[in-house]
Amino acid sequence: MKAIVVTDRVAGTAGMKLVERPEPQAAINDVVVQVHASGFTSGELTWPSTWTDRLDRDRTPTIPGQELAGVVTALGYGTTGLLVGQRVFGLSDSYRGGTLAEYVAVEARNLAPLPGDVDFTVGAAVAMPGLTAWQGLFVHGRLQAGQSVLVHGAAGAVGSMVTQLAREAGAYVIGTGRAADRQKALDFGAQEFVDLENDVLEDVGGAHLVFDVIGGDIGKRSAGLIRAGGTLVTIAGPTEARPADGLTIDFVLVSDRAQLGEIVQRVRDGRLRTNIGTVSTLGYAVAAFNQTKRINGKTIIRVRP
Ligand SMILES: NC(=O)c1ccc[n+]([C@@H]2O[C@H](COP(=O)([O-])OP(=O)(O)OC[C@H]3O[C@@H](n4cnc5c(N)ncnc54)[C@H](OP(=O)(O)O)[C@@H]3O)[C@@H](O)[C@H]2O)c1
């Protein structure tokens, strides 16, 4: 089968190559999925799981990509819950990855049915940002109606989902990002916008929940904005940033069939909009991930036309 591989940790997306690889086999509780659409998250090539297995052994050449939508073509030993021929979407395990390929083997529990009226491109585009936003807001952040949420990178893939879900849950949403992203963040539902390049972040006062996708200095300064009893939720990695009277939670998402169901239902009824920038093919995927211009919105690789 055709697949994108990476072998060189330092080379980043420039080291991606389109090659032939053996088709994956279904292990216990797996399904094999014929991938129709695949997504890749910018930070993936920095994650340890891309380069080593759980015992810290080299696992290159690695097929990157964790996000997928496609059709089940085989079941593993003992697999239940999904059928051959079923449309599905979700995430592969980060230590397996492999969705930038024609076929991928995934544990069935990491996938959910994709309704027939939702395009594969849309399914691949909402899985990762949708689950990350859902878990950060409702599982880890325990968001309540009437609370205020500061969403960093509100025009980005995750931030745009956080903004929409927080608004739907009855929160007051302040988005942040680059100057050029103001209108996009407001269009996704942010009620205020802080331009991190020109405004003073601290001028927003306080928030019950800060959802940080940027980290570093922005993460540290955000800790000072948390209201008493509030939470700094970050997906930018472990951090020393601690609110004076609140919690910091850094987490890595997990796939969850029930949450994928909640997300796709919102896509169907219009409560959740995708944030897709570019749709490309597997043949042009390496070029699509190596743009010199700024990437705006998610890049989705349409593996089957
Ligand atoms: N822990 C987890 O479970 C998890 C899950 C998903 C994603 N992630 C990570 O979360 C991060 C965000 O993912 P994403 O897919 O949402 O990326 P994205 O689509 O690139 O969104 C990030 C947004 O934040 C903006 N931004 C970044 N740094 C900024 C700065 N210093 N000032 C102003 N704006 C800034 C970006 O603008 P520019 O594009 O101009 O920089 C972009 O609009 C990535 O590092 C990803 O690896 C973690």
Image: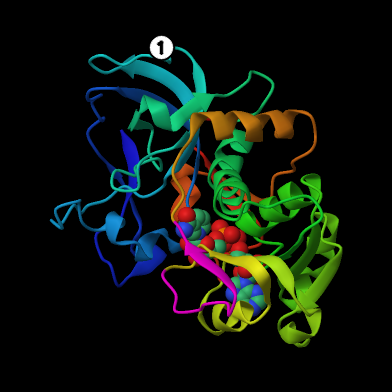
**Residue 101 location in percent, x, y?**
37, 38
- Determine the main secondary structure of the stretch shown in magenta: loop
**Residue 305 location in percent, x, y?**
55, 30
Identify which residue, 74 or 213, lies in the foreground.
213
245 drawn magenta: yes
In terms of image quadrants, where is residue 156?
bottom right
205 drawn magenta: no
Coloured how? rainbow
* Span of residues in magenta: 238-251
Q: SS for tag 1?
A: loop
Residue 180, relative to residue 200: is it above or below?
above
Going by the numbered disc 1, the residue's amino acid type is Val
Q: Viewed as shown, does residue 291 lie left or right of 46? A: right
**Residue 104 location in percent, x, y?**
34, 32
Q: Residue at x 78, y 76 (%)?
A: 194
Q: Viewed as shown, does residue 74 lie left or right of 152? A: left
Where on the image, by quarter, is ligand 1? Answer: bottom right
Whether residue 287 is visible to the viewer of this picture, yes or no, is: no
Q: Viewed as shown, does residue 215 lie left or right of 266? A: left
Residue 76, relative to residue 152: is it above or below?
above
Whether residue 1 is visible to the viewer of this picture, yes or no, is: yes
Q: Residue at x 37, y 62 (%)?
A: 45
Q: Please name the residue that numbered disc 1 is placed on.
A: 84
In terms of image quadrants, where is residue 232?
bottom right
Residue 205, relative to residue 53: is it above or below?
below
